[in-house]
């Protein structure tokens, strides 16, 4: 059994599991403390974006990690990918996606890591569409809708609500393994799941061709001018 996920608080509904876990962190809760919810009224993405999930159909979890490894965002995306199946890929920095035959991406899971690095803890928030009926999501996230903020529609693992708990346990065990592995192994496994390599991408300050990640998990981009740049995960919102 994984050492992650103890103690655990499960809520029928809360604003954001990340907020509950943060409160527990500030109150001194131990490494591995887990908050899950069947529904969120104010689920968050990065930079103030929203996370939507019909009640009881998605894994909505926040895990408190004390002394997290530097590549945590990459290791977490990889663990979700491991659980989501052989076809799952990662859109840098940590969206877990499927890629269709035409190369279009759809999003299975999102990750939101928030915390106080100077105090040595963070809350790893994961939303994974385990059994989501896609037609119950907001219109812009449904297949064929344009994915208002990310340019991606949502995708689901297509499992049943009964699979939520087994998927959670598998994810906790996989996370524990991924968090403990040496950085080179995380980087190598991440590179095999890279959904952006070779694609043209743009962000607020520029555009170029994605060329994989460097040893610190930054995205290396070949610029139209011939140079290269490395993007940090905190700084940019990518468009395809
Ligand atoms: C993320 O942000 O992808 C991080 C999402 C983290 C959610 C978890 S749920 C448990 C925990 N508690 C929280 O409050 N949050 C965490 P970002 O990269 O900013 O992507 C957000 C965008 O994803 C939205 O603007 C939508 O376009 C899209 N989106 C929202 N809900 C989705 C869903 N269920 N499936 C696929 N895409 C979704």
Image (tube, rainbow, N blue to C red):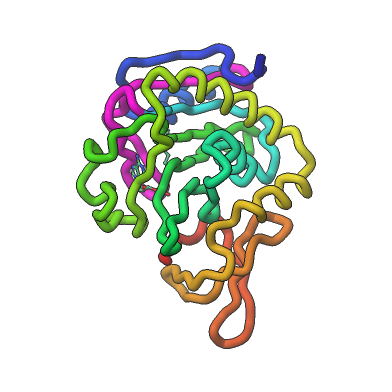
In the image, what residue occupies the spot 47% across and 18% down? 165
Find residue 59 and report its image quarter. top left
Q: Which residue is most to the left?
A: 139
Magenta residues (range): 30-57
Where's residue 32, x and y in %? 61, 21
Q: Is residue 19 visible?
A: no
Task: Give the answer, above or below, for where 45 lies relative to 173.
Answer: below
Q: Is residue 182 magenta?
A: no
Q: Quadrant of the C terminus?
A: bottom left
Task: Mark yes or no: residue 171 visible.
Answer: yes
From the top left corner, tell me how far across and down residue 174 is, in percent: 64, 30
- Image quarter of residue 212: bottom right
Instruction: Let me know if residue 38 is in the magenta part.
Output: yes
- Position of 11 with respect to 182 (left or right) is left
Residue 120 image point, x, y percent: 65, 33
**What residue occupies the far bottom of the structure in this picture?**
225
Residue at the spot x=76%, y=46% of the render? Answer: 185
**Which residue is at 54% across, 58% downward?**
195
Question: Overall secondary structure of the magenta stretch?
Answer: loop
Q: Position of residue 118 (x, y in %)?
A: 63, 39
Left/right placement of residue 182 relative to residue 153 reads right
């Amino acid at each position: 059994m994984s050492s992650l996920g103890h103690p655990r608080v499960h809520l029928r509904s809360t604003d954001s599991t990340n907020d509950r876990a943060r409160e527990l962190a500030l109150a001194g809760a131990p490494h591995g403390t887990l908050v899950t919810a069947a529904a969120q009224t104010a689920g968050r993405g990065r930079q103030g974006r929203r996370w939507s999930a019909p009640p009881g159909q998605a894994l909505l979890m926040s895990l408190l990690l004390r002394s997290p490894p530097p590549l945590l965002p990459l290791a977490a995306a990889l663990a979700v990918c491991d659980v989501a199946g052989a076809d799952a890929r990662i859109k840098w920095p940590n969206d877990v996606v499927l890629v269709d035959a035409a190369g279009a991406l759809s999003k299975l899971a999102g990750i939101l890591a928030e915390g106080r690095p100077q105090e040595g803890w963070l809350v790893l928030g994961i939303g994974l569409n385990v059994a989501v009926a896609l037609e119950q999501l907001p219109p812009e996230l449904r297949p064929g809708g344009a994915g208002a903020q990310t340019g991606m529609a949502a995708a689901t693992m297509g499992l049943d609500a009964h699979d939520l708990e087994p998927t959670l346990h598998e994810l906790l065990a996989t996370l524990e393994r991924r968090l403990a592995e040496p950085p080179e192994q995380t980087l190598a496994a991440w590179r095999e799941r890279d959904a952006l390599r070779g694609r043209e991408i743009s962000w607020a300050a520029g555009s170029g061709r994605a060329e994989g990640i460097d040893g610190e998990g930054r995205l290396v981009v070949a610029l139209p001018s011939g140079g290269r740049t490395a993007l940090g995960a905190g700084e940019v919102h990518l468009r395809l």
